[in-house]
Amino acid sequence: MSPPPSATAHAGLQRMGSSSSTFTTTNSLIKICRDHKGGINWMSLSPDGCHLLTASEDCTARLWRTSDNQCCRLLQGHSSYITFCHLENEVAFTCSADHSARKWEVATGQCLTVYTGHTSIVNRILVSRNLLFSGSYDRTARLWDVDSGRSLQEFQGHRNCVLALAHFSSSDILEASDMEGKEVKEFLVTGSTDCTVKIWEAFSGCCLQTLRGHVGAILCIVLDVPNKELFSGSTDYTIRKWNMVTGDQLKVFRDHQGSVICLEMVGRHLYSGSVDRTAKCWLPDTGECVRTYKSHKHSVSTLKYHAGILFTGSGDTCARAFNTRTGALQQVFPGHTFIINCIQIYDNVLYTASHDGTLRVWDIKEICSQTKHQKKTSVRSKLSQKGSLPHIFHNKVGCSPEENDDCEPVELL
């Protein structure tokens, strides 16, 4: 847990917000939800956007309606703090320091299944294609039968804690013609404090690849499945790109000056958050850092891309909104008193969950509409310049704005 910034630092941040013309700290706060009696470690949004799930140090999880931001279910049963959660439309999953994971019914809040077998803290779960994976401080990961709670496979081989999980299938990385007549195989990716990433065949438990190169703990993993690439962030200050099939290390991204805490892939851009108080945008193909998002007073603990805006949460107790194209800070969201552990966005509403135990709800409709307008104006301006389209866009990367709103051009510095 990161300590809160000093009162002086927080006051300075407030003054900066009131005097700057480039961003605002205007009160877009809709609601503060104080129902939890301990810090919120994670938050998950249901696929249909109807509910949020928060996981807390108070040993409970809470289900919230996004329509009115009211708590509608209290999930009780864990005997120690809840480390992580995952929400589907009809069921929810949690994992805990009590060495277990649980499945819950959203409609009633009833616990449906308890997954026991780990011998230490379960710090991460992953639910995909009706498969439940878990990673633990006991140096193992496990695959579970979702309905019965039976452990189907134990992945042994890491020499230390398993902190990060990812999943893909053979059908994700092979052409349809190559899959003809073949059974679809499922794969698990694990990242550990032993400095390695491992790729496992899920049902056999066989370790297919061990990715070596990092000299620090692996804190986060993100997959670019269409390009068969894997990215890992580490306490060694680097991000590394790997070929998911061969296990070859393809690129090392070295611009961060602190541990890389979080990663997000959007289109053909990779976003990262670090202990060095910055977030960065990278070109995955070249490893070039094309944008740095500054002004944080502490670690960037979480980030999320939405509608041309990069939202970050920090150990300095504030969330921030940056224009991803220009790097400009557009808004600061102050008010939390401890580190922000998770961010979710739905229907022009920003949700921030903090170790201070509160869930804060913010209206971001105005900032999103401003960014959208700026983007359209920028495109019209560029198209009105002299020269052919290839000349106009010769210093861009990615696809054009018309093709995919999530794959925007980034001007090279």
Image (spheres, helix red, strand yellow):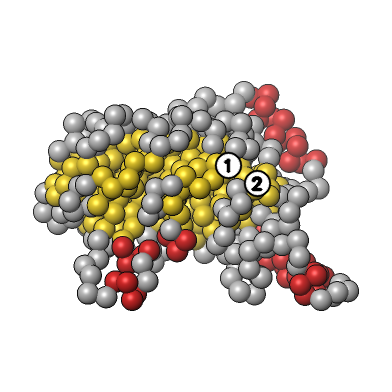
Give the residue type at disc 2.
Cys
What percent of the width, then of the height, locates residue 131?
A: 23, 56
Q: Badge 1: few (under 14), some or many (20 or more) residues near its Cα, within 10 Å?
A: some
- Which of the labelled discs sits on residue 289, or is there none? 2
Q: Is residue 81 above or below residue 53?
A: above
- Residue at 31%, 63% (x, y): give it: 170
- Mark 1: amino acid: Phe
Report the label total. 2
Position of 14 with respect to 71 (left or right) is: right
Where, quadrant-wise, is the N terminus in this rendering?
A: top left
The residue depicted at 11 percent of the width and 54 percent of the height is: 148
Residue 61 - label: none
Q: Position of residue 168 (x, y in %)?
A: 34, 58
Determine which residue is flagged by label 1: 253
- From the viewer's perspective, is residue 169 above or below residue 126? below
Q: Residues within 10 Å of mark 2 (few under 14, many from 20)?
A: many
CB-based contact (under 8 Å), mark 1 and mark 2: yes
The image quarter in which residue 64 lies: bottom left
| Front-most of residues 171 and 327 | 171
Is 11 situated above or below 56?
Answer: above
Judging depth in this view, the residue of 266 and 56 nearest the camera is 266
Is 226 situated left or right of 27 in this image? left
Q: Earlier in the sequence, mark 1 or mark 2?
A: 1
Residue 257 in the image, given as x and y percentages of width and height: 61, 31
Measured as percent of width and height from the top left, residue 71 is found at 36, 52
| Residue for point 64% across, 48% down | 288
Q: Is residue 187 left or right of residue 115?
A: right
At numbered mark 1, what does the secondary structure look like: helix, strand or loop? strand
Q: In terms of depth relative to the viewer, which is nearer, 338 or 401? A: 401
Could you tell me which secondary element the residue under label 2 belongs to?
Answer: strand
Question: Is residue 379 in view?
Answer: yes
Residue 335 lies in what quarter of the image?
A: top right
